Every structure is written in C-alpha cells, then in structure tokens.
Image (cartoon, rainbow, N blue to C red):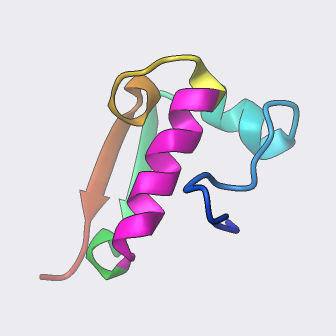
Amino acid sequence: MEITERLTCNITKISEMGKVLQTCKLIIWDESTMAHKNTSESFDSTLKDLRGNQKLFGGAFILLFSNF
C-alpha cells in the first residue's frame, strides 16, 4: 500500500482491493507493532471512506498481532 501525505492509502472504491476491503468482515494485520503510526491512521481513514462508515476502521474487525 502506498501512503499519501493526507493520511489515506492509494486504494479506490472501484479497484479490486477496494472491493475486497468494502465487503470483508475480518482483517488480519500481522506485525502490526512494526508499522509506523501513520500507517494505521491512513488505513483507518481509507476504510472509513471505502466502507462509508465513520466507525473505527470503517466498522471492520481488525485482528492486530505481532511478536512482542
């Protein structure tokens, strides 16, 4: 995923990835603790936009895990 300066990912609603993210119920994010803070904020903003839902991560269930 490419992150832009305005904290959104470069994924459109009509792209294949956009369609998947609009309909999935669970997103599993491995190595989440290694991601930069802007990455999670960008993904949150993108999911809100793609799903038309202003809840956290667009209302999708996000499973975050890593090796602590």
Q: Position of residue 63 (x, y in %)?
A: 30, 49
Residue at 34 percent of width and 43 percent of height? 62
Q: Quadrant of residue 10?
A: bottom right
Q: Residue furthest front?
A: 6
Q: Position of residue 64 (x, y in %)?
A: 28, 57
Q: Answer above or below: position of 39 versus 27.
A: below
Figure label count:
0
Main secondary structure found in the magenta portion: helix
Q: Quadrant of residue 30?
A: bottom left
Q: Answer above or below: position of 66 versus 56.
A: below
Does residue 24 belong to the magenta stretch?
no
Q: Residue furthest top?
A: 52
Q: Quadrant of residue 15?
A: top right
Does residue 48 belong to the magenta stretch?
yes
Q: Report the side of 40 relative to 52 (left or right).
A: left
Residue at 50 percent of width and 51 percent of height? 43
Q: Residue furthest left?
A: 68
Say which quadrant the N terminus sits in.
Answer: bottom right
Q: Position of residue 36 (x, y in %)?
A: 38, 76
Q: Answer above or below: position of 50 versus 17.
A: above
Q: Nearer the viewer, residue 2 or 23?
A: 2
Residue at 41 percent of width and 54 percent of height? 41
Q: Report the side of 22 relative to 41 (left or right).
A: right
* Segment tinted magenta in the rendering: 35-49
Say which quadrant the C terminus sits in.
Answer: bottom left
Q: Position of residue 32 (x, y in %)?
A: 33, 69
